[in-house]
Amino acid sequence: MPAQTSHTSQPGQPSQMTPDELARATAAAMYENDACSKALGLDILEVRPGYARLRMAVREDFLNGHQICHGGLIFTLADSTFAFACNTYNINTVAAGCSIEFLRPVHGGDVLTAEAVEQTLSGRTGIYDIRVTNRAEETVAMFRGKSAQIKGNLIPAGD
């Protein structure tokens, strides 16, 4: 028989979930109501506390007048990945600020992967770095987001 694991409930954490289970459940709850991520065809590849990895195929309708991916869509991929990472604790969290650096052009038909990593979480504020790479694993953009926790939970908390 497997050993019994005791879970200590954190604020915002349903008592019977591990942190990894909670992260996956919050991502599923967010995605269900996220019309933008669905419309862009974003795929959630992985989530765990303070971390998320999403993928987006660059469609022809994502291209700008230079026939490269519109920067706003790369920003949206990074911003959505940031959102999924900072909400993994089941405390409603929004962006308080963010910036992006575009490092190389992205062409139609490519596939982008964004990986968000929590750098610090202090009080209600977090800092997350998001690297966006192309199919060749070249970095095409770097995004930094500052998060702010607000009232409420994605999944009802309780014992």
Image (tube, helix red, strand yellow):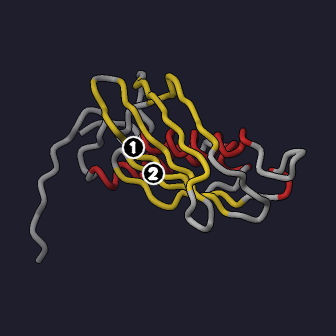
Q: Is residue 147 left or right of residue 12?
A: right
Which corner quadrant of the image does residue 142 belong to? top right
- Sequence-first tag of 2 and 1: 2
Identified by mark 2, the residue type is: Ala
| Residue topped by disc 1 | 88
**Residue at the spot x=45%, y=59% of the render?**
46
- Secondary structure type for disc 2: strand
Q: Is residue 12 left or right of residue 3?
A: right
Q: Where residue 69 sits: x, y (%)? A: 77, 50
Identified by mark 1, the residue type is: Thr
Quarter holding the C terminus is top left
| Residue topped by disc 2 | 52
Q: Is residue 34 left or right of residue 1?
A: right
Q: Where residue 74 sits: x, y (%)? A: 67, 45
- How packed mark 1 is, by other alpha carbons closer than 10 Å (few <14, some 14-19, many 20 or more), is many
Q: Is disc 2 in contact with disc 1, using a CB cutoff of under 8 Å?
A: yes
**Residue at the spot x=64%, y=42% of the render?**
102
Quarter holding the N terminus is bottom left
